[in-house]
Every structure is written in C-alpha cells, then in structure tokens.
C-alpha cells in the first residue's frame, strides 16, 4: 500500500539539510503501487518529483506538488555462473547497502563506489562515479514506469546512453519516469581497479588485494576529503568537472603549469575543485553556507542556510572561475 503524507518535512530527506516541505509525499513499495498512481489525478497530472535519497538535490523552496519516493527493497539473484552474478535490485535499496553486501559475498564491480550516498534507483540517473569506476560499468539494464502511459519499460545499458555524470534519465526522460529496478552484472573473478591516487599503496598497507581492503581504502580516501552528510550538510560534488577544448587547455597550461588536466575524447577534463581553489574560494563562507575547506567542489550548509544562499554562492563561484580561466562550470546537483 502506498503511504501518503501531507505538508511533509524534507529536512532529513535532503543531505544538504534544508528545512523545506512537500505538499504531498508518497512512499511506494512495489511497482504495482506506482502503476496505480495513474488513477490519482493529483499525481498523474500535477507537479511531481521522484526522489531517492535526496543526496543530489537542492531545494530552493517548499515543493508545491507530489514527491514520490520508490522504496522497493529487493536484492534478487537473477542468475549466477562461475564467472558472474546478475542482481536485480529495487530502486529503494540504499546504494552502500548493495555495495557492502556485494563485497561481503565476494562479488567484484561496485567496491570503488563504496559510501556514495543515495539509493540504487538514482545510480543510473547521473551514472554515479568515483575513484576510476562508474555505475555504468556494472549496470546491465534499468526498468522503469513511464509516467506518460504508465507502462513498465526496460532499457539496456547501451540504450541508457550513459556518459560522465549523465544518462538518458537526465535528458529526454527527465521527469518522465520512475526507475523501479536496476540489474547489475558483477564478477565472481577477482578484478581490481586501484590505480587511482594512492589506492594501490593503501590496499598494500591494509594487507593486500581483497575486496574488503579495497572498500576500506576507498572509505578512508573519501573520509579524508569529503564531508559526511550526517556531520555537515552537503550534496556531494556541486559542479561537474568541465571539459574544455584542447586549445584552451594548452593556453591555460602555459599560464598555470601546475593545473591538473586529463585528456578525454576530443577534449580535456579539468578538475573544477582545482579551478575553484585557484580563485581563492576553497573554505570561503557566506553566512550559513560555504565551500568545503578540504574539497572545493563541495558546497556545505553549516546550519540554517537555504537553497537560495547556496545558489548565490554557486553563481559567485561560476563568475570567478569564468573571469579567471574563461571556463564555464555546470552544476551537477538537481535544483528544485
Ligand atoms: N583539487 C584541488 N582542490 C580541491 C579539490 C580538488 O586542487 O579543492 C584537485 C586535486 O588535487 C586533484 C583533482 O582536483 O588533482 C581531482 O580531485 P579529486 O580526485 O578529489 O576528484 P574530483 O574531480 O574533485 C571527482 C568526483 C567525485 C569523486 C572523486 C573521486 C565529479 C564531479 N566528482 O571529484 O564525486 O568522489 O572524483 O573519484 O566528477 C560526487 O559526484 O558527488 C563526487 C563526490
């Protein structure tokens, strides 16, 4: 049975911790319940939003519509061979619970994505990624309810058109679907991806290559740089790392030889955190909100801030980076 709530407080449901509310909040525990919402005019025809763990959302005001939270909780083994396991996972499963249980069972593929906040249903939307891995490397298909015709549909990995922090769910299908199930293919054969930074060295110090040690090394790396939303409100990386043309990157490298840069396809990726730090904004504070002192890509809420305060700070950052480097930053979070 779906659960309905009115004037529902969202403070604990957005990791940056803004004190806003939803006119109506719906919790759904099964695909069938979501399908039934086609007969609910308020949801089917009105303003609505689908949310997972609220870790990539920035509310700028109370939400005057329906928020649907899919809470499907299954982790089913769909098939298993000596090489692989195929898991069908409900959208409401907490992402790190899936990673933890996969690591414990000796299944390779998700360990580098340890401790990323949010739910499984959100993982394909922005193709979550960290430490050399992306969700798309393990996702086989995504099942969703199409909110135009309330039919259940499935997209293969290729059809999801995954890219850096993006997918079809952030483009054509934005606001039009409820992801219900994600199917992952994980390896039973050891397969490590520890070339990022000092991961290999950390894993060695923990006693050598195994899944638990990789998870532990990733956790330590995250904790050293990224604030835990339980301690300090934040929505992870606030901006995407920008891709610039090779010619601009070369020009910038002449002026700033220490600039980190990564050739990627026909362009060059530059870390937004570095650009923001060079503008002197790392650790900057504007009232109740600020730029995290250890990772300039993360904007934080020290308590009592609003989404509008964060947007004002984000605009200041974009302006400063554009003025100094001629590079336009794009927000990674979804502004509501
Ligand atoms: N850097 C700085 N100053 C900073 C932050 C970073 O100079 O304040 C430099 C670092 O020295 C390094 C480079 O920027 O040379 C890259 O930094 P880092 O490895 O910390 O990663 P990132 O590019 O800032 C991305 C993801 C993170 C993910 C890390 C690790 C995006 C938008 N962000 O950050 O993802 O955890 O790589 O793989 O791609 C998230 O999406 O919410 C998120 C946290």
Image (cartoon, grey):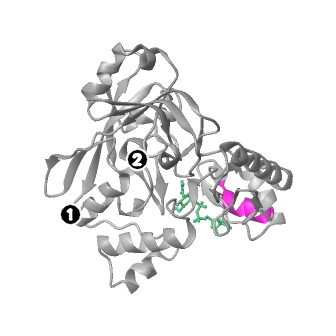
In the figure, is residue 196 to the left or right of 216? right
Position above or below: 193 against 129: below
Looking at the rendering, the quadrant in which ligand 1 lies is bottom right
**Which stretch is magenta?**
269-279
Crowding at dot 1, Cα within 10 Å, few <14 / some 14-19 / many 20+, comes out as: few
Task: Give the labeled residue for mark 2.
Answer: 136
Q: Secondary structure at mark 1?
A: loop
For disc 2, the neighbor class at 10 Å (few under 14, some 14 to 19, many from 20) is many
- The residue under the point 37% across, 34% down is 179
Please name the residue shown 32% across and 26% down the image. 34
Location of the N terminus (image quadrant): top left
Mark on residue 18? none
- First in sequence: mark 1 or mark 2? 1
On the rendered structure, is 64 left or right of 89? right
**Horizontal and vertical percent position of residue 116:** 44, 57
Image coordinates for residue 184, horizontal then vertical, percent? 29, 47
Image quadrant in which you'd find residue 133: bottom left
Majority SS type along the magenta span: helix
Is 25 in front, or is 31? 25
Whether tag 1 and tag 2 are in contact, CB under 8 A, the answer is no
In what quadrant of the picture does the C terminus appear?
top right
Residue 64 vertical position relative to residue 77 in the rendered view, above or below? above
């Amino acid at each position: 049975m779906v659960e309905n709530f009115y004037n529902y407080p969202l403070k604990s449901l957005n990791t940056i911790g803004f004190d806003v509310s939803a006119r109506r909040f719906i919790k759904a525990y099964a695909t069938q319940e979501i399908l039934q919402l086609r007969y609910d005019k308020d949801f089917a025809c009105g303003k609505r939003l689908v949310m997972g763990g609220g870790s990539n959302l920035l509310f700028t005001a109370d939400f005057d519509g329906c928020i649907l939270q899919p809470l499907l909780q299954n982790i089913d083994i769909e098939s298993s061979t000596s090489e692989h396991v195929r898991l069908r996972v409900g959208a409401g499963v907490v992402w790190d619970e899936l990673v933890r249980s996969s690591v414990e069972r000796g299944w390779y593929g998700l360990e580098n994505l340890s401790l990323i906040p949010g739910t499984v249903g959100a993982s394909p939307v922005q193709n979550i990624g960290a430490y050399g891995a992306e969700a798309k490397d393990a996702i086989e298909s995504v099942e969703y309810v199409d909110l135009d015709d309330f039919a259940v549909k499935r997209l293969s990995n290729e059809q999801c058109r995954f890219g850096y922090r993006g997918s079809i769910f952030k483009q054509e299908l934005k606001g039009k679907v409820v992801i219900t199930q994600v199917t992952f293919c994980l390896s039973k054969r050891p397969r490590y991806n520890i070339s990022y930074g000092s991961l290999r060295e950390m894993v060695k110090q923990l006693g050598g290559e195994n899944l638990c040690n990789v998870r532990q090394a990733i956790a330590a790396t995250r904790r050293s740089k990224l604030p835990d939303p339980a301690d300090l409100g934040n929505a992870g990386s606030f901006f995407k790392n920008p891709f610039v043309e090779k010619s601009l990157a070369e020009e910038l490298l002449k002026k700033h030889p220490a600039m980190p840069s990564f050739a990627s396809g026909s362009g060059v990726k530059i870390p937004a955190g570095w650009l923001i730090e060079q503008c002197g904004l790392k650790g900057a504070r504007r009232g109740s909100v600020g730029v995290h002192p250890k990772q300039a890509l993360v904007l934080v809420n020290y308590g009592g801030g609003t989404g509008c305060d964060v947007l004002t700070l984000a605009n200041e950052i974009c302006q400063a980076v554009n003025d100094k480097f001629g590079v336009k930053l794009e927000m990674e979070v979804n502004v509501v």
